[in-house]
Image (spheres, rainbow, N blue to C red):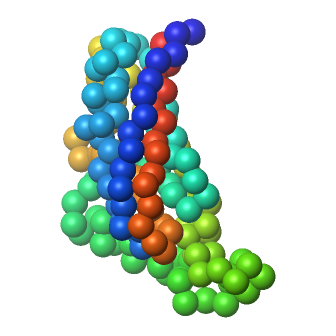
């Protein structure tokens, strides 16, 4: 198995910002020259996630609202109480979404659906510089 890849670096505002990574991942895939394989996209950090979605304003708003319902910021989370912290909701949301996605490659193209993009979700409560590893396996 051959492995190549690269890093994407994104400055975010935090607070649930959703960032489209698709073109950056495509660029790394093109550079790799891999025709058949898989691209693994992994975000480093305990308060960040990676998933796929239709990246459009309504979808972004709906996902943001759903995650607020599942892990509300204004809750008496043990993490915040025990650590004097304010970002327990961010850790929980990241655990729900997960830090990575794997996308098959055929003829050098990501096999995403027409309305499907790869996105980073930064759940932390302050701005961050996020690093995303893209590994292309063949």
Residue 16 place in picture, x, y as percent: 41, 69
Residue 132 place in picture, x, y as percent: 46, 42
Question: Compared to 89, does 36 lie above or below?
Answer: above
Q: Quadrant of residue 90?
A: bottom right
Residue at 33% x, 12% y is 33
Residue 58 place in picture, x, y as percent: 24, 69
Q: Quadrant of residue 47?
A: bottom right
- Say if residue 78 shows up in the picture: no
Residue 8 place in picture, x, y as percent: 38, 39
Residue at 50% x, 55% y is 49
Residue sticking out furthest to the right? 82
The quarter in which the N terminus is drawn is: top right
Residue nearer the viewer, 48 or 51: 48
Q: Count numbered badges in the picture.
A: 0
Residue nearer the viewer, 9 or 42: 9
Residue at 26% x, 55% y is 55
Q: Quadrant of residue 61?
A: bottom left
- Say if residue 29 shows up in the picture: yes
């Amino acid at each position: 198995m051959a492995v190549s890849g690269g890093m994407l670096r994104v400055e975010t505002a935090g607070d649930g910002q959703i960032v489209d990574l698709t073109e950056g991942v495509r660029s790394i895939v093109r550079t790799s020259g891999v025709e058949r394989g898989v691209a693994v996209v992994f975000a480093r950090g305990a308060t960040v996630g990676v998933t796929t979605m239709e990246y459009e304003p309504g979808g972004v708003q709906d996902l943001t609202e759903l995650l607020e319902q599942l892990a509300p910021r204004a809750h008496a989370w043990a993490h915040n109480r025990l650590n004097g912290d304010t970002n327990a909701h961010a850790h929980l949301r990241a655990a729900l979404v997960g830090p990575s996605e794997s996308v098959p490659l055929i003829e050098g193209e990501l096999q995403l659906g027409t309305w499907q993009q790869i996105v980073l979700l930064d759940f932390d409560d302050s701005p961050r510089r996020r690093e995303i590893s893209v590994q292309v396996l063949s």
